[in-house]
Amino acid sequence: MDYVIDTLGNLLHQTAFFNLSWGNYVMIAVACVFLFLAIKKGYEPLLLVPIAFGMLLVNIYPDIMISPEESSNGVGGLLYYFYTLDEWSILPSLIFMGVGAMTDFGPLIANPISFLLGAAAQIGIFSAYLLAILLGFNDKAAAAVSIIGGADGPTSIFLAGKLGQSGLMGPIAVAAYSYMALVPIIQPPIMKLFTTKQERAIKMKNLRPVSKLERILFPIVVTIVVCLLLPTTAPLVGMLMLGNLFRESGVVRQLTETASNAMMYIVVILLGTSVGASTSAEAFLNWSTIKIVILGLVAFICGTAAGTLFGKLLCKVTKGKINPLIGSAGVSAVPMAARVSQKVGAEEDPTNFLLMHAMGPNVAGVIGTAVAAGVFMAIFGI
């Protein structure tokens, strides 16, 4: 009888209930909220489901992220190895290849002024950098945090790893991906605040047709120009443009399909779960994380506002030919931000079709955020 009681007691104490802190329960609740938003509300489920589930796993079973040095048998936890691929910048770069293979750069080529709108939206990044310095972050940490303003998870992870801010990578990545998922909630009030009803109802002329030669030359030329100016952006910009060249060349259909489907979804699973698994209660529930989340929100708001206001300026300069709403798509959340521009414009006039016009600044924002990361790396001599 004593043997049975001892055995049952040992089994009971092996359950997670005796090993979890209050912080773990808080993070489990947060994970469940994220799952609700992803599944019930449909907020970017491809991002939030793996992130939330990784968050759930690590707060129930922390050893799933244990390093080989800390384990008793010299073997790390499953998600530790996934996370290592984040730190090595492998997964973020592969994500960019997939984005390039999935995205039509034609609207940006047809309307090069979109580059200006994408650049304007990067103001959020640099404003957050200055604010982070004021809040006590060191210069490299401030740079890593500020990239959240581009609403670009892969670039946030990439820069945090390059600047040696692995300790902040989890909160930074979760904040970036969360704001990407919440674009439909965060952006519309800002867009409406800075535009009038008449401006939101502006219809833009159809974009000119883009030739196949232009589509093929664009990724090649951008790679050469950007990587010559900022060589450290090659892993991101290079992979983005390589994926797009797969798409536009028309001679490597199998590579295009693999990069935009099978590979992309595999990488999203690995990156999402590993990012979520970096949010243990010990790493996430502290003042630094709270400041990162707030800074990320401020940066994202500033980026959206700057893009919208610059769109408003271009609207005045062109005498009403540009709808200011497309400026808000200058952040890097592709294609969510462009869809929001379309949605807000359609609320004023259901016949208004802004999606393709907004895709130009949206693609420019992807390139702009990568360039901003390259500028920070150049500043710090990385």
Image (cartoon, helix red, strand yellow):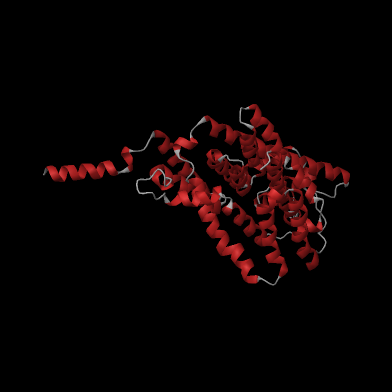
Give percent across and percent down for residue 270: 51, 54
Closer-to-camera residue (64/1): 64
User: In the rendered view, does 164 fall on the left or right side of 234?
Assistant: left
Task: Count all numbered tags in the image, as a single digit.
Answer: 0
Any part of residue 40 in sight:
no
* Residue displayed at 31% across by 38% down: 18
Give percent across and percent down for residue 196: 78, 40
User: In the rendered view, does 109 fall on the left or right side of 140?
Assistant: right
Indicate the quadrant where residue 20 lies. top left
Q: Quadrant of the N terminus?
A: top left
Give percent across and percent down for residue 216: 76, 65
Q: Is residue 52 above or below residue 223?
A: above
Q: Residue furthest left?
A: 1
Give percent across and percent down for residue 183: 63, 45
Q: Quadrant of the C terminus?
A: top right
Any part of residue 54 in sight:
yes
User: In the rendered view, does 339 fall on the left or right side of 41?
Assistant: right
Indicate the quadrant where residue 66 lies. top left
Q: Is residue 285 above or below residue 221?
A: above
Closer-to-camera residue (270/87): 87
User: In the rendered view, does 248 fall on the left or right side of 52?
Assistant: right
Q: Residue furthest bottom?
A: 251
* Residue displayed at 38% across by 49% down: 74
Closer-to-camera residue (39/142): 142
